[in-house]
Image (tube, helix red, strand yellow):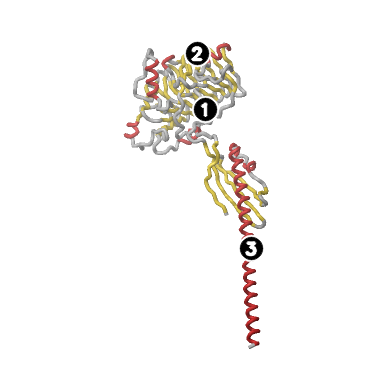
Amino acid sequence: MGQSSIIFAVAATLLVAIVLLGTQRSNNESDADLAVYHNRMFAREAALTGLNLTVRRLVDDPDHWFSNTAQYEFPQSTYNGAQFQTTVTSTHPDTVFVVSVGTHHSRTFRVESRYTKGLISGGLAELFNYALVSDDDLHLSGNTEILAVNGAANADVHANGDLSANGSIHIEGYGSFGPAGNASITPAHKTDDFFDPNNDSNGGDSNVYSADEIELPLIDASRYSTSPPADLVFAGDATLFDIDRAWLTANGYPAYVGTEEHPFLMYVGGDLEGHGNIVIDGIYFQAVVAGEIEIAGNTEIYATSSPKPGRHASQAEWDTWIGENLTAAGTTPIGFFAEGDITFGGNVFSVGQLYSNSNIRFNGGGGRQRNIIGGIVSATADITLSGSIVVQYAQLATTGSIEEFFSDIPEGVRMLDYAEF
């Protein structure tokens, strides 16, 4: 009986020891697992901190995403007792790949993300806020008038180079020139008579002044030569034609083509010459021309089928007709974009925004009958207006398919992909 008690006691002791040993081992394993978990969490927090700091740098300076990615990176850095390091790579000017690795003791955590530039939604490039803007010089002479469609708005003009005006000039806006340019107004005392903004916020300061350069992109017509099926492609020189919604429907184009979001895009592989009356009625229309645009003689381009008022029409008649050529928002639905020169000569009238990679020249004109309702932009060379020219400024309604004009002003960054492990 005594021997049995001894055996039982020993067995119980061994059992308790085994239980205690198992408990200790379990506790040790739990502590180890908890340590691994904590180390991993600290490493993750460090990695996310590195990612956030890198993204902040990307937002603050979006201009060198492709050329100098190293400036956005963080070398080995410390956060809350852990370390992180980030790398940034880019294979496209508007896209970056960010890797952030966090480390705490022997544990690491990796975050990978890809970003693109977030752009101001719906905004046109700055250049479209001007009636005339040239990347080089802007010359105004003769009986030149630059008016605003909306009498409460301005029809400002800008040259990144020199701005000159002489003759009988009337501009319902400010005149500005780039930091390396100059203004030449003849006679000088007429400066604020020539430039007379409807909405004057300059107070007693001159209405002609030096301003920052405006970036003007170059049109690459070749990228539009392989257009979607809804676009019309011309090879070589071409003459414009009458076109309206009925024409689009009759020729099998989808209902969405010719809208503000999807304007009818016409590619011309050579030069574009305009002769006679041209009607582009009831649709949004954009012509992209690889060569030059020359509009001469008595050519008239309308955005409505209503006849243009006569020479002696009242201002009210003109206002009504101009309104019919614009959208409800007062913008022009038509744009002409050329790699070569744009030249208007004779008694020419056109509705639309004009954009050239080279020179834009207007001469002749019909005085108070207007010569263009829209805006005029030259991307690399001069704008010259001479004779009896009247421009009534209306902003472009849409950039449509013209990728060069998408606003590149960053609003932040937009995440494309994200992974962590």
Sooner in the amino-acid sequence: mark 2 or mark 3: 3
Q: Which residue is mark 3?
A: 31
Residue 55 in view of the camera: yes
**Closer to viewer: mark 3 or mark 1:** 3
* Residue 244, image quadrant: top left
Residue occupying the point 61% across, 62% down: 33
The reply to whether discs 2 and 3 touch (Cβ–Cβ < 8 Å) is no
Q: Position of residue 250 (x, y in %)?
A: 32, 34
**Closer to viewer: mark 2 or mark 3:** 3
Q: Is residue 301 above or below residue 30?
A: above
Q: Is residue 136 left or right of residue 323?
A: right
Q: Quadrant of the N terminus?
A: bottom right
Q: Which residue is mark 1?
A: 127
Sooner in the amino-acid sequence: mark 3 or mark 1: 3
Q: Which residue is mark 2?
A: 142
Q: Amino acid at mark 2?
A: Gly
